[in-house]
Image: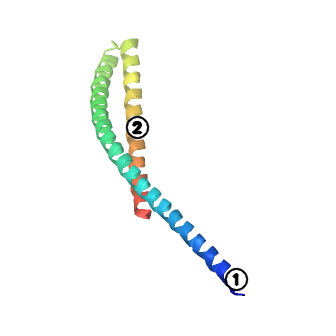
Amino acid sequence: MKKGIIIVLATTLLIACGETDTRKEINRRKAALKEKQETELKKAQDELLRTDSLLQIANLELDSLQQKVEKDKKALKATPEELTLLTRTRIKRDSIRTQAETLGMKIRYIHKKQKEE
């Protein structure tokens, strides 16, 4: 009977030691995840600032070009090259806008995950 109790106690002790190592690993991974989130958040915020600046420039270019093309259309002087340039500028602006929106969603997602922890 005593032998069975000793075996149970020894097994329990071994399991408890294993859980400690497991708990340490879990805590280490949680800390690494938190650090990774902070790094990714900072990187995304910096990239969003640059992207927002590019978006503002692209909007100004598009507005300027659009006014010029509209003026030329009214005067019946719009060239295919102007129209192509306008379309490409619009595509460029839309691409930058999509990138900015994606970065914004990434930042919101990281904030959400940080609140959950």
Residue at (42%, 38%) from the top-left corner? 98
The residue under label 1 is 3
Nearer the viewer's eye, disc 2 or disc 1? 1
Tell me the kind of residue under disc 2. Answer: Gln
Residue 39: image x %, image y %?
A: 36, 47
Q: Nearer the viewer, residue 100 or 82?
A: 100
Residue 90's image quarter? top left
Image: 5 above or below 100:
below
Residue 94: image x %, image y %?
A: 40, 33
Q: Nearer the viewer, residue 79 or 92?
A: 92
49 left or right of 92 in image: left
Which residue is situated farthest in the right direction here? 1
The residue under label 2 is 99
Tell me the kind of residue under disc 1. Answer: Lys
Residue at (30%, 23%) from the top-left corner? 65
Residue 11: image x %, image y %?
A: 64, 74
Q: Secondary structure at mark 1?
A: helix
Image: 90 above or below 74:
below
Q: Secondary structure at mark 2?
A: helix
Q: Which quarter of the rendering shows the N terminus? A: bottom right
Image: 24 above or below 88:
below
Image: 17 above or below 48:
below
Disc 2 to disc 1: CB gap under 8 Å: no
